[in-house]
Amino acid sequence: MVTGRASARSRAWFLAAAAVLAAARPAASLRVAFVSDTGVGNADPAWGWTDYRGVRRGEYKVNGELCKDHKGEPCRGYSRARDVLAAAKDNGAELVVHAGDLDYESAPRMWRLFVDETVRGQGMDFVAAKGNHDADGWDGVSGLWSDPDDGYAAQLRPTQPGNCYGAYGESLVCDYGAVTLVISSVGVDAAGESANQREVAFLERALSQSASRFKVCVWHMNMENMQVSYKGDSTGWGAFEICRKHGAFIVNGHAHTYSRTKEMARFGERRWSHTAEDLRVADAVLAGAQDENVVRLRSGENGSTAVAVVGFGGYRNEAQLKSAPHWAKVYSSKCLDGDGACETAPEQKKYGALMCDFPEDANRAECWVVTTTRPEASRREKRAAYRNPVDRFFLVAGEAADETRASETNFDDYNDGRTLSVASDAGREGGVRRRRRFDGDLDRSTCVDVQPPDHSCALQKRWGKCDWWFMKSNGLCDRTCGRCVDAPRAKREDYEDDYVEQPRAAEEKPADAPAPAEYLDAIDFDSIAADVLRLRQDEGTPSA
């Protein structure tokens, strides 16, 4: 915080600098939250109680209904998925893309209720890939995914955004213009490249037909050396190579950590009927001419991309067991000694989501990681956490290999020159953390739409059923039907870390300084001050 007296001239300079340095959200962009391995969102599992009739009762509710697993027992798995999705909403997510392993209760209807309450009821769209815990046969449920009425696909298909087409969760394409999401179940039903030829062919076909500037491949499973936990080979390297050659960013789940690679120039080499592992980091990154937090997405035989594993969506965050030079960032509950890329996740901040802004009129997409805070965290704590993401990087699309010299690519060009203060960076495990301006909203209403069992709130309103007794008595569709009461707006103390002390008008007037104007809340004075000090140091100018 910048405190003390300040002249009107210096204050005006700060305001002008803020206008230049503050990173703003692109005017037209899609903000996506990538999550995986979430669980159904119960941070306080109900182990159940038995009533006087000997019937075991649960205590955890989703969308107003008691949560029960596939056996009809109370949902007992631990998860902070509800907090992860709330953080995504706080940060302005418009679409939640789930990379598989949904509820860990094998209860498709409960998961649908959870999505209705925590995602769709909060104004976000939702789409998911099939994970191994969602596949037919898991927990002995034969039609867990594919049952035409009660499977995950049947439950989630009605929530599918209108931009999507194909087989839900298995071979699905979502075209948003600026970005195309290609969602696959490669490696889920069978392991190995030869067993996934149909899935790899789908990836090739879907990416070839996309005209979007940004492309993202989303699937659940891993290859052993493309994760830092204990997961083995499942997909084959062919799927990774197809996405690389089309300049498509890759998002996976399955491994219960967060990890992101540097820009990758190769994953494997085709040999006869399979793709042999051949992991190569981009030359510019290896030479130090390009920052590890800039990823060029280029198509062609010499194309490049990166991989993010987002399996820390609320269910578990496990220990790092593997280390390799191609990792730019790892966020784990326990890091390997000496791995500078890994940051140890505090207990209350173990879970999170990868956020990305995909602009319509620019070739640079910003991505950053948001994490949970302690359940009783103040608005100030949340805002501080969101302004200091665990990982922040940029995807640069459509750049041919010979168009820009790697030496011209500097992270500060993308970061608007804004980093944390030296004091904040000093001794931080896992490397330097870049600060970003929080441009979400903590003042959203807590009123949500409890979705009816059969038809959506939008249809109920269209049919004129908002005032029907069963809707009101069960608290259904309160937001859509206009029965919500707006939450109170933020008070000054909620954002105390972002305010500066106003100069006194005159020494003879000891009265309290007036409250700062509302627009000051959007100005990151401490970052500006750090930038000024850094620039003075660079120029050899004394700081005081």
Image (tube, rainbow, N blue to C red):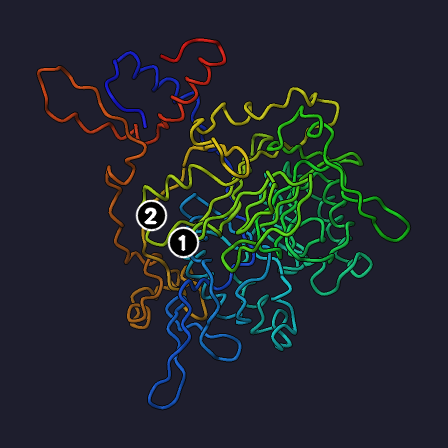
* Residue 431 image point, x, y percent: 54, 35
> Where does label 1 land, which residue?
122
Q: As rendered, which of 252 and 400 lies closer to the eye?
A: 252
Q: Which mark is residue 264?
A: none
Amino acid under disc 1: Gln
Q: Residues within 10 Å of mark 1 (few under 14, many from 20)?
A: many
Residue 122: horizontal and vertical position, in percent?
Answer: 40, 54
Using residue 449 as the reference point, say whether residue 208 is left or right of it.
Answer: right
Residue on which disc 2 sits: 444
Q: What whole-number distance in Å separates the C-alpha atoms at marks 1 and 2?
A: 9 Å
Under circle 1, the secondary element is helix
In terms of image quadrants, where is residue 519?
A: top left
| 117 to the left or right of 312 | left
For disc 2, the neighbor class at 10 Å (few under 14, some 14 to 19, many from 20) is some
Q: Residue furthest left?
A: 508
Secondary structure at numbered mark 2 = loop
Tell me whether the residue at label 1 lies in contact with that at label 2, contact meaning CB atoms closer than 8 angstroms: yes
Residue reaching furthest to the right:
272
Residue 337: percent from left, percent from top: 60, 44
First along the sequence among labels 1 and 2: 1
Q: Position of residue 427 (x, y in %)?
A: 49, 34
